[in-house]
């Protein structure tokens, strides 16, 4: 049974940092795109970042987080990370990790097959 478990969320002041982790179990995803999404209250889920496994692990970011967030992966640990710096109040949301396809870095959640339960990130202004 595949399971994705996020951790690292919490309450932080604006300008602060958090590092989210997502550990996968039940299957190895070293050759799959891994992604992060978020959903704020009253809003639709949105793409945050994705990282591929080939070609040196290319990374992709939503414009809203580019330059502040960094996605990375450790295939030996079946884990993906999201380093979030310069946090803003508008980053407040539940953050979800997901496993995507073998090829490409889609921004639509429907193209991701496995999801974690989410971790809350709250940024106070």
Image (cartoon, grey):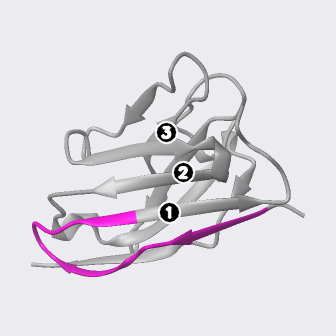
* Residue 50 percent coordinates (x, y): 49, 39
Helix, strand or loop for disc 2: strand
* Residue found at x 52% / y 44%: 73
Instruction: Pick out the residue farthest to the top.
Output: 55
Q: Nearer the viewer, residue 74 or 37?
A: 74
Q: How crowded is mark 1: few (under 14 residues within 10 Å), some or many (20 or more)?
A: many
Name which of mark 1 and mark 3 comes first in the sequence: 1
Disc 3: CA contacts within 10 A as few (<14), some (14-19) or many (>=20): many
Q: Is residue 114 above or below residue 95?
A: above
Please identify, in this view, whether the residue under mark 3 or under mark 2 is nearer the observer.
Answer: 2
Query: In what element is the residue under mark 1?
Result: strand
List x then y, in percent, for residue 23.
63, 61
Q: Mark 2 points at which residue?
A: 80
- Of 106 and 51, the residue lying toward us: 51
Q: What residue is disc 1 on?
A: 21
Task: Name the residue beneath numbered marker 3.
Answer: 50
Q: Name which residue lies at 72% across and 28% down.
A: 102
Which stretch did the figure color magenta?
3-19
Element class at badge 3:
strand
Residue at mark 1 to residue at mark 3: CA–CA distance: 14 Å
Any magenta on residue 99? Answer: no
Taking the spot 79% from the left edge, 46% from the top edge, the residue there is: 28
CB atoms of marks 2 and 1 within 8 Å: yes
Q: Which of marks 1 and 3 is in front?
A: 1
**Most common SS among magenta residues:** strand
């Amino acid at each position: 049974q595949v399971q994705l478990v996020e951790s690292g969320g919490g309450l932080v002041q604006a300008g602060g940092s958090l590092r989210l982790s997502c550990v996968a179990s039940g299957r190895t995803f070293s050759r799959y795109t891994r992604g992060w999404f978020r959903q704020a209250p009253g809003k639709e889920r949105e793409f945050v970042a994705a990282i591929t496994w080939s070609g040196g692990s290319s990374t992709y970011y939503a414009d809203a987080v580019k330059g502040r967030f960094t996605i990375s992966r450790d295939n030996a640990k079946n884990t993906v990370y999201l380093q979030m710096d310069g946090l803003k109040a508008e980053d407040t949301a539940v953050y979800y990790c997901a496993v995507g396809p073998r090829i490409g870095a889609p921004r639509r959640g429907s193209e991701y097959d496995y999801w974690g339960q989410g971790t809350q990130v709250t940024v106070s202004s």
